[in-house]
């Protein structure tokens, strides 16, 4: 009885301390985001109009100016470029990833081990490594300032991250395939008629992650899009200074919202996605 | 395919081994034979018209410099390097096709000798599509990776051994200089001191930030895993929110936060202090600490999600046994949780270490493009990857930049291979599960 009582008291202290730490941590994570949201509704445009973290007065000006006052900073155009790159890379990239993952998961062939090892080694080096070379190659191929250049790079790099999708295909039972083969279906037919309908969730997941990457990337656009009317949102926002702070905040919130919604919708996939490298060899 | 069996083989096989597709034509495989023959002819014509010259050009990198006075166009060394590389790729591809050609003619030969009918072109294509589905499916992904991942790496490795960059850019001629760039990095005084200063900071940064992010995430996951925490999904939403906001927005926002007009300085000045240049050129340790903090803010949610996933797979019986044995909470953590989590996350730990080692974004956004005294085109917070960017993209020192990226390659690969090999050796001992 005595022991139980002491245990109870301890656990109350423990609970209180835990919650205080939790609140502090959540505050640290939430406050910068809240600050940006508030800033996007600020009436004054410059960061000097703020009282510390808080805007002097609120209005929707930031958002409306984003889309109307486009002479200096053409946000709608940046958005259009970003959307174009992200959608195209997502479609092409998803096709390539699904094909790679399915093939590696389903088929046994001589060069498979070698392919997987190559991917593993290439994955050890961030794509950023060959950046100078990519830049020089793009200059020599005349793909600087071309949105297609970026789309090619994004979608071509996509198959390297095939492990999550392979994990999914590994779980599809072999007996379904064997039944289909006995019925005389060729590999192409098996893929289109059986695999694809069964793998809708992983296709959606792949498409969304392939979309999210170009949507929030800044390295490649910054490197390859030098022309002002080719800028993506990331490059454009990088060029805003302290006097354009409200415009920056509004522009940032505007493109962050779809991604945030997407991540929350995908949150049950997130843990598997993040730990894929840990589970698979 | 060895010589003996070739000597013994029939005439069409010999013909095909010499001229691709000719054997197939003799066996009346018209379309296939013509296609092979076309590839053969195209390669021969290419080699005669351009290929041979391109390969020579690869080694000389041009002999004639452009002369604006005489109006001669001269050689473009970089284009020659690329075309030489292309020629090598084409030769390799040619041999691959040739190999498939020999395999094909042998199969036809076997069928004809056995008196079986040889399938027509359409039929053999559909057989190929089915039996070799993996080739059909993988050809595009592999080609993409080859052109956009492997080619740049090969190109970069080659550039590291040339004097490309600085004043030596086309129309001037570029030359092979062997290990000249590496010698420069390790001997020229200002480049050398910059390199070692940056390397030391880079290693420190990678170790510190990996450590902070990893244990920060683990701590958060353990905290959220406690029984007394109700509404876990609610609490977890905040780090996930931070995780979901695109990184460049976070980094730019923090830059604004610590800028002269930013809120932090607002409170300092209104409390009577003078504005602090947190990220200025003379900021010193302040900028480094802010970098660590911003990186932690961005990365801790990821490692929290990872640790949550791992912890949920964990066997809880161990804890019960341990608490019956009277082990304290701390001891349970050190002896059970930590080894388990570290064991199952070693590969992720490697990737995250390398990611931090090459973390371009943080200091590019927070400070970007500052050049300090005592550094060659870099500042005290720049990592090797930032220096590489300054050297090659902003200042056209391509050769030295490529050498730096090769050095980064070597460091990261030695690190990850060692850890990888050691961890898989560790795994074989089956200390767990």
Image (cartoon, grey):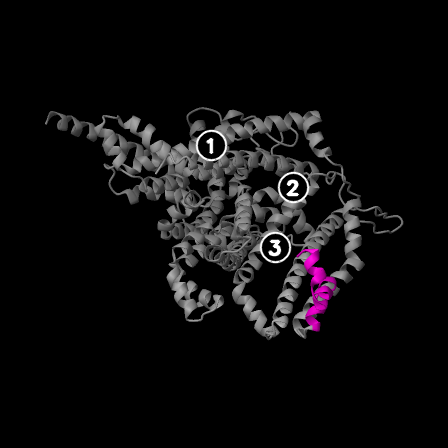
Q: Is residue B11 visible?
A: yes
Q: Residue A71 at x, y = what percent?
A: 57, 53
Residue A50 visible, this orientation: no
Q: Which residue is mark 2?
A: B393
- SS class, disc 3: helix
Left/right of residue A119 with respect to residue B180 in the rendered view: left
For the N terminus of chain A, the image quarter is top left
Q: Identify the residue under disc 1.
A: B209
- Please tell me in which quadrant of the rendered image residue B39 appears: bottom right
Instruction: Give the distance between the C-alpha atoms of the residues marked 2 and 3, in whole angstroms.
Output: 18 Å
Spatial distance from mark 3 to mark 1, Cα to Cα?
Answer: 33 Å
Q: Position of residue B83 (x, y in %)?
A: 73, 52
Please tell me whether mark 2 or mark 1 is closer to you in this view: 1
Please check whether the numbered discs 2 and 1 fall on a single chain: yes
Secondary structure, mark 1, is helix
Q: Is residue B91 magenta?
A: no
Q: Disc 3 designates what residue?
A: A149
Q: Residue furthest right?
A: B70
- Return the chain for callout 3: A
**Which subunit holds the residue at mark 1?**
B
Q: Residue at x 54, y 37 (%)?
A: B358
Q: Position of residue A99 (x, y in %)?
A: 50, 59
Mark pair 2, 1: CA separation: 26 Å
Q: Which residues are magenta?
A: B1-26
Of the two numbered discs 2 and 1 on the same chain, state the one appearing first in sequence.
Answer: 1
* Vertical position of residue A165 compared to residue A54: above or below: below
- Mostly what secondary structure, the magenta segment? helix
């Amino acid at each position: 009885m005595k022991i139980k009582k002491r245990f109870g008291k301890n656990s109350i202290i423990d609970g209180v301390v835990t919650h205080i730490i939790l609140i502090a941590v959540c505050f640290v994570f939430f406050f910068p985001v809240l600050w940006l949201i508030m800033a996007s509704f600020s009436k004054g445009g410059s960061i000097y109009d703020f009282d510390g973290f808080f805007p002097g007065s609120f209005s929707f000006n930031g958002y409306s100016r984003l889309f109307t006052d486009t002479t200096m900073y053409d946000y709608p155009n940046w958005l259009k470029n970003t959307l174009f790159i992200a959608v195209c890379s997502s479609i092409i990239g998803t096709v390539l990833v699904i094909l790679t993952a399915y093939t590696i998961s389903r088929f046994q062939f001589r060069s498979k081990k070698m392919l997987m090892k190559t991917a593993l080694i290439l994955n050890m080096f961030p794509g950023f490594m060959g950046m100078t070379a990519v830049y020089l190659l793009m200059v020599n191929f005349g793909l600087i300032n071309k949105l297609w250049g970026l789309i090619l790079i994004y979608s071509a790099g996509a198959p390297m991250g095939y492990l999550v999708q392979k994990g999914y295909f590994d779980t599809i039972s072999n007996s379904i395939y064997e039944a289909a083969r006995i019925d005389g279906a060729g590999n192409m037919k098996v893929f289109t008629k059986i695999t694809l309908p069964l793998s809708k969730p992983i296709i959606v997941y792949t498409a969304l992650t392939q979309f999210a990457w170009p949507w929030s990337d800044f390295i490649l656009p910054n490197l390859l899009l030098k022309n002002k009317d080719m800028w993506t949102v990331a490059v454009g926002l990088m060029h805003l200074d302290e006097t354009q702070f409200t415009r920056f905040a509004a522009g940032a919130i505007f493109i962050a919202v779809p991604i945030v919604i997407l991540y929350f919708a995908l949150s049950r996939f997130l843990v598997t996605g993040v730990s894929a490298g840990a589970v698979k060899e | 395919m060895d010589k003996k069996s070739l000597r013994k083989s029939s005439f069409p096989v010999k013909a095909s081994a010499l001229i691709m597709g000719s054997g197939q034509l003799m066996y009346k495989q018209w379309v296939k034979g013509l296609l092979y023959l076309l590839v053969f002819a195209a390669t021969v014509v290419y080699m005669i018209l351009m290929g041979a010259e391109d390969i020579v050009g690869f080694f000389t990198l041009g002999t004639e410099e452009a002369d604006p006075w005489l109006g001669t166009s001269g050689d473009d060394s970089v284009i020659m390097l690329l075309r030489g590389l292309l020629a090598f790729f084409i030769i390799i591809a040619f041999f691959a096709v040739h190999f498939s050609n020999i395999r094909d003619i042998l199969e036809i030969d076997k069928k004809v000798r056995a008196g079986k009918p040889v399938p027509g072109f359409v039929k053999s294509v559909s057989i190929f599509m089915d039996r070799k589905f993996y080739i059909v499916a993988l050809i595009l992904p592999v080609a993409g990776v080859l052109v956009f991942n492997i080619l740049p790496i090969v190109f970069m490795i080659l550039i590291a051994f040339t004097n490309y960059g600085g004043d030596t850019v086309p129309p001037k001629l570029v030359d092979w200089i062997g290990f000249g760039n590496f010698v420069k990095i390790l001997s020229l005084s200002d480049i050398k001191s910059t390199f070692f200063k940056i390397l030391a900071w880079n290693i420190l940064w990678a170790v510190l930030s990996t450590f902070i992010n990893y244990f920060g995430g683990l701590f958060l996951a353990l905290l959220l895993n406690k029984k007394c925490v109700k509404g876990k999904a609610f609490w977890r939403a905040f780090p996930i929110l931070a995780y979901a906001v695109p990184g460049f927005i976070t980094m730019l926002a923090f830059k604004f936060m610590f800028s002269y007009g930013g809120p932090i300085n607002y409170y300092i000045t209104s409390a009577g202090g003078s504005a602090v240049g947190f990220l200025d050129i003379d900021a010193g340790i302040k900028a480094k600490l802010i970098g660590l903090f911003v990186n932690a803010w961005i990365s801790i949610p990821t490692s929290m999600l990872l640790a949550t996933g791992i912890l949920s797979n964990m066997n809880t019986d161990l804890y019960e046994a341990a608490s019956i044995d009277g082990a304290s909470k701390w001891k349970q953590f050190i002896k059970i949780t930590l080894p388990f989590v570290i064991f199952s996350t070693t590969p992720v730990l490697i990737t995250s270490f390398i990611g931090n080692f090459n973390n371009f974004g943080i200091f590019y956004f927070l400070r970007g493009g500052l050049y300090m005294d005592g550094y060659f085109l870099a500042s005290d917070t720049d990592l090797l990857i930032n220096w590489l960017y300054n050297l090659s993209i902003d200042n056209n020192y391509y050769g030295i930049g490529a050498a730096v990226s090769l050095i980064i390659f070597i460091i990261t690969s030695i690190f990850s291979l060692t850890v990888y090999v050691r961890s898989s050796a560790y795994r074989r001992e089956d200390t767990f599960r």
